[in-house]
Amino acid sequence: MQTADGELIDLRSDTVTKPCPAMREAMSRAEVGDDMVAEDPSVNQLQREVAGFFGFEEALFVPSGTMSNQLAIKTHTQPGDEILCDETSHIYTWEAGGPAFLSGVTCRTLHAPSGIIRLEDVEGKIRPGNQHYVSTRLVIVENTHNRGGGAIHPLEGIRQLREWTQRHGLILHCDGARIWNAMVASGISAREWGAHLDSLSVCFSKGLGAPVGSALLGSKAFIQKARKFRKIFGGAMRQAGILAAGALYAFRNNINRLVDDHANAGRIAQSIRETAALALEYPTPPTNLVWFKVDPQLATGDEFVSLLRKEGVLVSQAGPQICRAVTHLDATGPKIQAACDAIRRVSSLLEAGKK
Ligand SMILES: *Cc1c(COP(=O)(O)O)cnc(C)c1O
């Protein structure tokens, strides 16, 4: 079964959204120039607005969140330095070994609950300053935390980490691919989040629904240096204003509506709670990510995903028994209802031993 128009309901990620007509319109009308020499007015406008929004001096438009994070690492470190990050963090787990490959740094991974690094996780982790050791340089937090179930990093925790990194001459970067979701769910403003960070990476291509683009935010000197590395990484673009206009449309129009995605994630979670075949990994999804386990006695994650696909609903698999459903602006209202119904139907089949 599928929706009335026969479309699949795609909950694999909030990256699957397609630009709406108004966004395409904004993109097609974008004023452009050569961004390699900082002369694209649309890119400049986006960078100014987003930097100001989070209270940073400058921003740099880049093709992806991965490039943004890796540029931050490259700009903040020297080869042979060490990063402190959570073991399930995106920069460590899902960026293809970028820190080693591109920056020649080691990652010391921390085991933090829901990926949320606390002061006690980093305390005592600074390497001694003698020839045997790498130099501890950078702490990276992720907000919201993807593998942590969309967890919001408490602002007070970030403030404490900043105070600690400053005291020890370290740097604090935030992978804020979904910081918009943290803002909307917590009611804490962009400026408050930004105030306690040395640099921040934000994505326009996740929940905000732009087709392409992320931004790296920081001080003027930091962005100036990062701009050169963007060139080296092959990410300096020419008439990128066409993309920036889509990102700007997303930024101006699609932040507040994320509350709907969070409510919809709550509905998906409720349908999972009602089954015996599935269990939520995190009791109540704080934002738009729903991680859940399939009972190994009844099915593998693979089997569950393909049975659900036959019902017209796509979720992603992230381990033998682990799945993830993500809500976003292209899956709302009746589609969420249909997805919940499909989850219940497939689970009942499994529970009745009829897979
Ligand atoms: C998606 C994501 C990124 C990277 O974004 P891409 O644009 O896919 O490279 C970084 N961090 C987190 C937490 C993400 O979910």
Image (cartoon, rainbow, N blue to C red):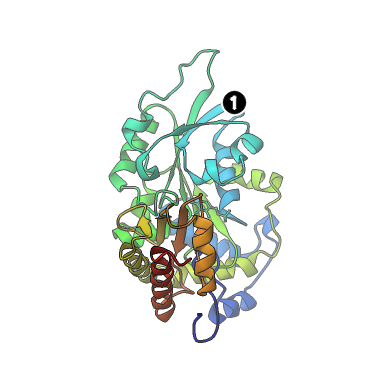
Residue 252 in view (yes/no)? yes
How many labels were placed on the picture? 1
Q: Residue at x 35, y 37 (%)?
A: 161
* Residue 243 location (% of width, % of height): 62, 67
In this view of the protein, which residue sits in the foreground, 343 or 35? 343
Q: Secondary structure at mark 1?
A: loop
Q: Residue at x 31, y 37 (%)?
A: 160
* Residue 61 location (% of width, % of height): 58, 57
Q: In the picture shown, does residue 203 fall above or below 232?
A: below
Residue 59 in view (yes/no)? no
Instruction: Identify the residue under disc 1.
Output: 80
Whether residue 282 sits left or right of residue 236 in the image: it is: left
Q: Residue 36's quadrant in the figure?
A: bottom right
Q: In the picture shown, does residue 335 fall above or below 165?
A: below
Q: Residue 74's quadrant in the figure?
A: top right
Q: In the picture shown, does residue 155 fall above or below 316?
A: above
Q: Is the CB–ligand 1 distance for label 1 below 8 Å?
A: no
* Residue 42 location (% of width, % of height): 59, 67
Residue found at the very far bottom of the displayed protein: 4
The three-letter code of the residue at mark 1 reads Gly
Residue found at the very far front of the displayed protein: 353
Q: In the picture shown, does residue 297 fall above or below 336?
A: above
In this view of the protein, which residue sits in the foreground, 248 or 298? 298
Q: Residue at x 38, y 70 (%)?
A: 344
Label 1 CA crowd tier, 10 Å (few <14, some 14–19, many 20+): some
In this view of the protein, which residue sits in the foreground, 97 or 283? 283
In this view of the protein, which residue sits in the foreground, 66 or 25? 66
* Residue 323 location (% of width, % of height): 47, 56
